[in-house]
């Protein structure tokens, strides 16, 4: 008889009793420290306190965040492209979290794909604005006069409404005493906690302090991204970029992915890739395809940064009384980092409240959520590798463009390529779902037909070139 | 300021979901007000007004039945559609997501119980 690998209700109860024996459960008066007040820290705190309240558990939550998200520029920024995916907007709404108009700088209704062979606009399959372009902090440098409200600040407000306290003190060390984590603060204060949730991303020095913990927390692999904010009048911004995110499939050497995201009076240029440097950034911004879409040489760049981006998973993002959420632990490859912060933050909070804070509890109830992201990222790597091959050939670029253009122009056409591009760029669906879609006979048949059609013009133009 | 709102804009009186139609999504009101109405042989009956943060059409996510009522915009409103597939996929990973929906459905059952009791009182 095949036994189910799914945990049974009895398993859940046995894990509770195991945790209780070792006193690894949160009880009335338990104290939880959350390191970092970005989305993962705020989601974790919000759900932890909400679920604790639901079972009449009285716990204290301290969010350690030295920055104020009311400040413009680097001082209040979390260095991110600032797009909340279609799937996360829907899930947040189902959770009762509706992003206010003051936080959403632009509701996105389409994605425009730009290539040297042409452009195609892919409309939202739902026919409505379900992607939010926003600022994590209070906007870029020089944005003090713009009507902005920080996304991270909004989420932090949700957590404090549930009872979390913001502690604006610097942590200088983490020590382990009698099986409890102690935080050492810059003012000499020492605080003991029952659980420490690390939500400090990959750009914080706090990550280095974890080396002092007894467990081996191997950090995730990272690379550098590039983010730049350009300012135009809102009218000009609408005229040039509209309500679309603009993405680029270019054959510039070492180029992987870039997008321009409209946000009120600003546009955020985001570049990611494993081999990104100033030369590549310059080549991209000066590329004729980019210039055709957005005048990066005339619009002033008011703020830029080159943050670290999580590229892989921490091998074990948990231990006894320690759990890592969001970028500090595991995130989706290149896409939907805020969605990963939500998923891992909520999974960690659920585990801590209902199953306990032991390594075993996190392994059994938190790790499956992380593992599903890891497995999906492995498929994502295959998808991005295939995309790299496709965008480096003019014939395949032309075939992709032609297929997507025809699907968008024809009412009722099955949007094989459009769905793939939409999901790849928006991060709205798991990579595994996109991968399955590429095996659909309709996708393969249409792609082959468009490849065949795309080869002929290439041959003809080659002949013309040869004969002058 | 250009709209940073999410969802779809509906003008006054525009039908968002129609009674008797099949559906594969639920909706959350983002701004404005919508009216829930039910048609019968005796005519059209007003059931409720819903405002920002309220959701409707959730029965289609859990049952394969046609819409039991129509919902139309009462003034200009913005409504966000939630796909059944997106919601059920996430509920599979995180069953607690359904708790928020259950809470609202529980409130509605409580309200309906009160209505039934009032109806019985007036007819006895």
Image (spheres, coloured by chain):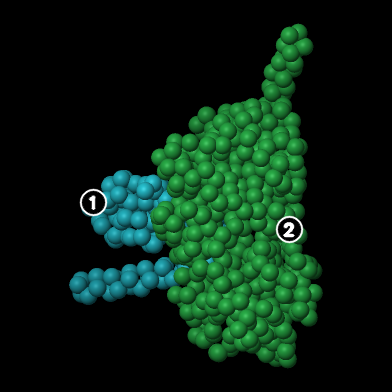
Chain colours: A green, B cyan
Q: Position of residue A37 (x, y in %)?
A: 56, 70
Disc 2 versus disc 1: nearer the observer: 2
Q: Could you say which disc has been placed on residue B43 in the image?
A: 1
Residue under the image location 49 percent in, 63 percent down: A71
Of residue A63 and residue B66, the one placed in the foreground of this image is A63
What kind of element bears circle 1?
A: strand
Decide: is A169 above or below A180.
above
Residue under the image location 75 percent in, 41 percent down: A254
The residue at which mark 2 appears reads as A222
Decide: is A377 above or below A237.
below
Of residue A134 and residue A325, the one placed in the foreground of this image is A134
Of residue A37 and residue A408, the one placed in the foreground of this image is A37
Quarter of the image with the C terminus of chain B is: bottom left
Of residue A27 and residue A153, the one placed in the foreground of this image is A153
Q: Could you say which disc has been placed on residue A62 in the image?
A: none
- Decide if residue A5 is in sight here: yes
Q: Residue furthest top?
A: A467
Decide: is A424 above or below B64.
above
Could you tell me which chain the residue with mark 2 belongs to? Answer: A
Q: Residues within 10 Å of mark 1 (few under 14, many from 20)?
A: few
Q: Position of residue B26 (x, y in %)?
A: 45, 55
Q: Position of residue B73 (x, y in %)?
A: 31, 50
Instruction: Give me the C-alpha separation between circle 2 and circle 1.
Output: 63 Å
């Amino acid at each position: 008889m095949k036994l189910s690998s799914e945990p049974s209700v009895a398993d859940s109860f046995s894990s509770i009793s195991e945790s209780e024996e070792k006193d690894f459960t949160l009880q009335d008066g338990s104290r939880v420290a959350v390191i970092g007040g970005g989305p993962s820290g705020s989601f974790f705190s919000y759900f932890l306190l909400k679920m604790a309240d639901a079972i009449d558990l009285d716990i204290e939550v301290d969010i350690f965040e030295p920055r104020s998200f009311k400040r413009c520029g680097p001082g209040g920024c979390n260095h991110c492209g600032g797009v909340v995916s279609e799937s996360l907007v829907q899930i947040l709404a189902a959770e009762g979290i509706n992003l206010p108009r003051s936080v959403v700088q632009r509701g996105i209704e389409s994605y425009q794909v730009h290539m040297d062979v042409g452009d195609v606009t892919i409309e939202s399959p739902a026919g409505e604005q379900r992607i939010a372009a926003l600022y994590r902090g209070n906007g870029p440098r020089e944005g003090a006069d713009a009507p902005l409200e920080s996304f991270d600040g909004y989420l932090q407000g949700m957590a404090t409404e549930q009872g979390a306290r913001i502690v604006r003190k610097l942590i200088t060390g983490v020590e382990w005493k009698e099986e409890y984590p102690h935080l050492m603060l810059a003012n000499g204060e020492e605080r003991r906690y029952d659980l420490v949730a690390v939500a400090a991303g990959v750009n914080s020095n706090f990550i280095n302090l974890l080396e002092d913990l007894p467990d081996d927390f191997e950090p995730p692999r990272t690379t550098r991204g590039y983010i730049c904010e350009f300012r135009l009048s809102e009218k000009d911004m609408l005229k040039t970029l509209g309500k679309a995110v603009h993405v680029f499939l270019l054959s510039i050497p070492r180029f992987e992915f870039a997008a321009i995201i409209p946000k009120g009076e600003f546009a955020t240029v985001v570049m990611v890739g494993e081999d990104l440097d100033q030369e590549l950034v310059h080549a991209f911004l000066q590329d004729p395809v980019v210039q055709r879409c957005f005048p990066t040489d005339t619009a002033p760049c008011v703020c830029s940064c080159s943050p670290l981006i999580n590229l892989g998973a921490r091998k074990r993002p948990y231990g006894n009384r320690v759990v890592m959420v969001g970028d500090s632990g595991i995130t989706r490859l290149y896409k939907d980092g805020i969605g990963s912060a939500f998923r891992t933050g909520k999974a960690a909070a659920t585990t801590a409240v209902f199953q306990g804070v032991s390594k075993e509890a996190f392994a059994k109830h938190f790790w499956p959520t992380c593992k599903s992201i890891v497995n999906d990222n492995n498929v994502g790597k295959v998808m991005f590798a295939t995309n790299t091959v496709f965008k480096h050939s003019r014939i395949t670029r032309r075939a992709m463009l032609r297929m997507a253009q025809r699907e968008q122009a024809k009412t009722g056409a099955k949007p094989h390529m459009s769905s793939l591009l939409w999901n790849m760029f928006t991060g709205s669906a798991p990579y595994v779902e996109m991968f399955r879609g590429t095996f659909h006979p309709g996708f393969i048949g249409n792609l082959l037909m468009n490849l065949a059609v795309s080869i002929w013009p290439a041959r003809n133009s080659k002949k013309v070139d040869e004969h002058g | 300021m250009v709209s940073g709102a999410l969802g779809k804009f509906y003008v006054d009186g525009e039908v968002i979901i129609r009674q008797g139609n099949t559906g594969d999504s639920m909706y959350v009101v983002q701004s404005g007000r919508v009216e829930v109405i039910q048609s019968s042989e005796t005519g059209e009956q007003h059931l409720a007004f819903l405002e920002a943060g309220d959701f409707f059409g959730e029965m289609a996510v859990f049952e394969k039945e046609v819409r039991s009522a129509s919902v139309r915009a009462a003034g200009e409103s913005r409504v966000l559609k939630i796909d059944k597939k997106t919601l059920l996929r996430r509920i599979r990973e995180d069953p607690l997501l359904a708790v928020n929906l259950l809470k609202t459905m529980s409130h509605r059952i409580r309200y309906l119980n009160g209505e039934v009791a009032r109806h019985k009182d007036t007819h006895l």
